[in-house]
Amino acid sequence: MNTATTPSAAAVPAVDYVHGYSPREGQRLGDQADTLAQLLHGGTSYPPGSRVLEAGCGVGAQTVHLLRSSPGAHIVAVDQSEESLARARAHVTDLFPAAPVEWQRADLLQLPFADAEFDHVFVCFVLEHLADPLTALAGLRRVLRPGGTLTVIEGDHGSAFFHPDSAYARAAIDCQVRLQEAAGGNALLGRQVQPLLAGAGYENVEVRPRTVYADGTRPGLVDGFTRNTFIAMVDSVRDDALAAALTTEADWDRGIADLHRTAAHGGTFHYTFFKGVAVNPF
Amino acid sequence: MNTATTPSAAAVPAVDYVHGYSPREGQRLGDQADTLAQLLHGGTSYPPGSRVLEAGCGVGAQTVHLLRSSPGAHIVAVDQSEESLARARAHVTDLFPAAPVEWQRADLLQLPFADAEFDHVFVCFVLEHLADPLTALAGLRRVLRPGGTLTVIEGDHGSAFFHPDSAYARAAIDCQVRLQEAAGGNALLGRQVQPLLAGAGYENVEVRPRTVYADGTRPGLVDGFTRNTFIAMVDSVRDDALAAALTTEADWDRGIADLHRTAAHGGTFHYTFFKGVAVNPF
């Protein structure tokens, strides 16, 4: 998603990556990934020796978690951005100097791999940035061996609701949705993961919601998710939203202020990610 | 919620119960309760011999599940509707002829019980119908012994999203929200459960989302929840929505048709309930 996307938009060279590539954005993505790691990565573990493609690794925020939960797996991490790849490599090598990761610049729609080369494919916060996720999924299926698994994680901004409710806050979120749409993506993709996987020919598709709910009794989540992930993500498109005349300064500021109220005493915040696992048929 | 409410609005005699009291509505509520029982009741079990107040039992849809998960507990089930109570008694006695249930007509805001009379209080799909849920929660705390627990389950219509998305479908759902608001209730209450329980003086408040997600790989849930619970619930307010000029026949029919598309091949549907447990402080 965008709430938790990594700079991995990879496959659409013609459009800008909606979240940008600034160091601050990289930091935000790292923070969020740590907070959400258990929620998102729980249940994902690849056997030692298996070849795993991480398609759209961005700055490596999820690569770190893959390494933690799958020691001994051989990970091939690709992204279309040379800069993201360099940062991912630095970040991962810093934490795991001897990590069995192979870094490669690649376009998701023209993967430079042989058929059935991988045992598993992992795609996190990538499809939401693609103009044609179905074609990308079909391409990933080509490089996945029969019987191998595909894991997809995506958010959905339509799942965000909160107390106190606010039309201004909802409008600010909608700016992000519209900017992502203008860039060829879809910030509401989470709800489509199941039909997309089935439509791309995968079998045994199983999609489950992974819901983040933060209230005053969970201050770490309020800080780590509501403030530092979700609100930071929305606020990062402020200038673009103003430039595109999707909002005014006053409306925007009120929307962000209202979002911050949901992280204050008595506030609550809800967001749902979707995690899908499917098998490439024999 | 309304997606899964029981006719237990109990405490606001001056306004009509938004879902009505028809036999068909009772059947819908029974169906939905069965489908959702595990999701909603998981983790709720009261020890033998404990006295449990079910506040707003409606037609007994949840009472049955309380009896199943807490054999030996003594349940006092109250509702403001004599008719609902009679149906609840018949329904429960049919399934559990010797069930230790005491039925009593009562107004939630004027509970005819002594202070600290109950070990536990259970309230499901009730607060959403009250004009002043905070006062009701304070009254429930009065009859709960110090150290006893309160369990609250509520839905939130703002959590409903689906594929294919549809402005008509969203407008139909919004009719339900506005009718419930006009009747003094709040169909978006789920997100407020935590601040409400804390505000009413309960301690150790713990609220967790319980998310229903239905897609084509889960036909039982598509049928039991999307079609027979949620869409049926929305469609049950058709005449009221037309009478209140909240919609037109054409818009309504398209909204309902679009909701049914989310239950067809390739469709998905998401809804979140909130379950809160809290303790009456010593």
Image (cartoon, coloured by chain):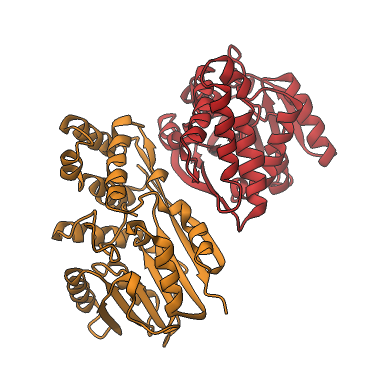
Chain colours: A red, B orange
Q: Nearer the viewer, residue A108 or B48?
A: B48
Q: Quadrant of the C terminus of chain B?
A: bottom right
Q: Position of residue B123 (x, y in %)?
A: 38, 67
Count of residue discs:
0
For the question of whether residue B43 can be seen, the reply is yes
Q: Position of residue B82 (x, y in %)?
A: 18, 72
Q: In this rendering, would A28 be left or right of B226? A: right
Q: Residue at x 28, y 31 (%)?
A: B168
Q: Nearer the viewer, residue A26 or B240?
A: B240
Residue B268, relative to residue B69: is it above or below? Answer: above
Q: In this rendering, would B174 be left or right of A99? A: left
Q: In this rendering, would A152 be left or right of B81? A: right
For the question of whether residue A1 can be seen, the reply is no
Q: In this rendering, would A38 be left or right of B134? A: right
Name the quadrant containing residue B128.
bottom left
Q: Position of residue A153 (x, y in %)?
A: 55, 38
Name the quadrant containing residue A91.
top right
| Residue occupying the far bottom of the picture | B49
Residue B4, relative to residue A149: is it above or below? Answer: below
Q: Position of residue B14 (x, y in %)?
A: 23, 60
Q: Nearer the viewer, residue B124 or A281?
A: B124
Q: Residue at x 20, y 41 (%)?
A: B241
Q: Quadrant of the N terminus of chain B?
A: bottom left
| Residue occupying the far top of the picture | A14
Residue B180, relative to residue A183: is it above or below? Answer: below
